[in-house]
């Protein structure tokens, strides 16, 4: 028979927005000494914002954004949503006569809050003035005139997306296989990326997430995204630490973005594991366990599910994917990392009552 105190514990958990799959899990919760935190959607809100588009030399920022958005419209990843939800220019002849370089700020309606050094370098003084043609195109958000058609969409978890984009308007009919994803993934597929490598490095050093859009075998531009840590994350990490847990940040994102997030919430640089592929998240948890740690993991994504199941205790963000919630032992219904230390404290209190 299940001790009443455990049932009371699960009931109290429900009041706090912590759903526990079985009362016996409270026991596991008590023992953990390490807490692995996914970055995107767990420590951050997972609502990335596109803050910059840096075209490769000779490319048009508006076209880079439009083709990338066409493919990302079919993606569920926070990176994809940020790019797809952004006001996108529809193809119109006005955006096409491509001058040598397009000024990045003009191609982007967001105030250039975080222009990357690379973006600034690429904007020649002559190109510094806003380009009205691009602004007009961007203003027509959602207009379906000559909208791009996407076929053969593919999402490669932790890497990027691709699809064949057909653009047919004003006598033009083009079908291009467009790839959007991390630089290394594109390079592996034979895409020429040297034109954008500096812009990617600059954005990542600056703590941003940078993905590259490519077609016809060449990288055409860099999309720079930011996803600030949520206001409650730093306190939650402090509380987890006060409960005797060692926090570790685990992410598929680049090292620069990972370090920026870790520092913002008070996780040490040496406890940051970045650029891990979804299957490597499991290996990272197993490595900690092999070192003697009892691991709790908090995550939200499809790519976190296997690692949540591998951890001694899996906690899913209630705002996350079904795959994560199904794989986890506990669900933090409010989708707030502040519930993680609450769950640990609750189980310890409950078990103290029993003993
Ligand atoms: P996280 O662990 O932070 O949730 P993921 O493993 O889901 O990150 O993704 C890792 C990286 O893969 C992203 O930072 C991005 O560079 C790339 N990526 C994933 N999905 C997409 C997408 N839809 N479009 C472009 N890039 C993507
Ligand atoms: Mg995530």
Image (cartoon, rainbow, N blue to C red):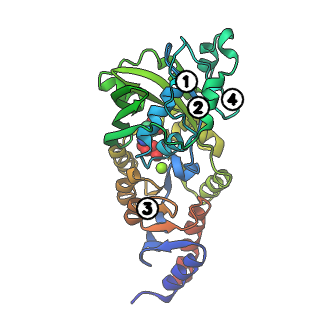
Residue 217 in the image, given as x and y percentages of width and height: 33, 20
Count of labels in the image: 4
Q: Earlier in the sequence, mark 4 or mark 2?
A: 4
Q: Nearer the viewer, residue 144 or 206?
A: 144
* Tag 2–tag 3 contact (CB < 8 Å): no
Q: Residue at x 43, y 27 (%)?
A: 170
Tell me the CA gap for discs 4 and 2: 18 Å
Label 1 neighbour load within 10 Å: few <14, some 14-19, many 20+: few
* Tag 4–tag 3 contact (CB < 8 Å): no
Tell me the CA gap for discs 1 and 3: 52 Å
Q: Residue at x 55, y 24 (%)?
A: 94
Q: Secondary structure at mark 4?
A: loop
Tell me the CA gap for discs 1 and 2: 8 Å
Q: Secondary structure at mark 2?
A: helix
Whether residue 355 is visible to the viewer of this picture, yes or no, is no
Q: Residue at x 54, y 82 (%)?
A: 11
Q: Secondary structure at mark 3?
A: strand
Residue 123 in the image, given as x and y percentages of width and height: 63, 15
Q: Quadrant of residue 204?
A: top right
Furthest residue in direction front, as rendered: 171
* Tag 1–tag 2 contact (CB < 8 Å): yes
Label 2 neighbour load within 10 Å: few <14, some 14-19, many 20+: many
Label 3 neighbour load within 10 Å: few <14, some 14-19, many 20+: many
**Residue 137: numbered disc:** 2
Q: Read off the residue under disc 4.
A: 112
Q: Read off the residue under disc 1.
A: 94
| Some atom of ligand 2 lies within 8 Å of the CB belonging to the residue at label 3 | no
* Tag 1–tag 3 contact (CB < 8 Å): no
């Amino acid at each position: 028979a299940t001790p009443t105190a455990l049932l009371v514990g699960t009931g109290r958990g429900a009041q706090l927005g912590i759903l526990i799959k079985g009362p016996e899990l409270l026991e596991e919760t008590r023992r953990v000494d390490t807490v692995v935190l996914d970055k995107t959607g767990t420590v951050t809100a997972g609502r990335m914002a596109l803050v910059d588009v840096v075209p490769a030399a000779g490319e048009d920022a508006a076209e880079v954004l439009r083709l990338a958005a066409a493919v990302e419209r079919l993606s569920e990843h926070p990176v994809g949503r940020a790019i797809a939800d952004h006001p996108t220019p529809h193809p119109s002849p006005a955006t096409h006569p491509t001058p040598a370089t397009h000024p990045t700020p003009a191609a982007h309606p967001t105030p250039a809050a975080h222009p990357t050094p690379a973006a600034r370098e690429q904007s020649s003084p002559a190109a510094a003035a806003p380009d009205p043609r691009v602004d007009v195109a961007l203003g027509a958000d959602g207009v379906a005139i000559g909208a791009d058609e996407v076929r053969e969409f593919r999402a490669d978890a932790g890497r990027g997306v691709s699809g064949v984009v057909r653009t047919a308007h004003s006598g033009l009919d083009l079908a291009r296989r467009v790839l959007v994803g991390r630089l290394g993934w594109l390079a592996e597929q034979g895409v020429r990326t040297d034109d954008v490598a500096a812009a990617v490095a600059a954005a990542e050093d600056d703590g941003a997430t940078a993905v590259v859009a490519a077609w016809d075998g060449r990288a055409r531009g860099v999309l720079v995204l930011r996803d600030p840590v949520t206001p409650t994350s730093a306190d939650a990490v402090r509380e987890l630490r006060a409960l005797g847990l060692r926090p570790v940040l685990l992410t598929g994102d680049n090292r620069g973005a990972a370090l920026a997030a870790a520092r913002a919430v008070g996780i040490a640089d040496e406890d940051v594991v970045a650029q891990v592929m979804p299957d490597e998240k499991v290996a990272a948890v197993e490595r900690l366990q092999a070192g003697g740690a009892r691991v709790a993991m908090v995550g939200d994504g499809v790519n976190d599910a296997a690692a949540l199941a591998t951890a001694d205790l899996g906690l899913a963000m209630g705002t996350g994917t079904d795959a994560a919630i199904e794989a986890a032992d506990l669900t933090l219904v409010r989708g707030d990392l502040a519930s993680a230390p609450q769950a640990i404290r609750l189980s310890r209190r409950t078990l103290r009552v029993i003993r």
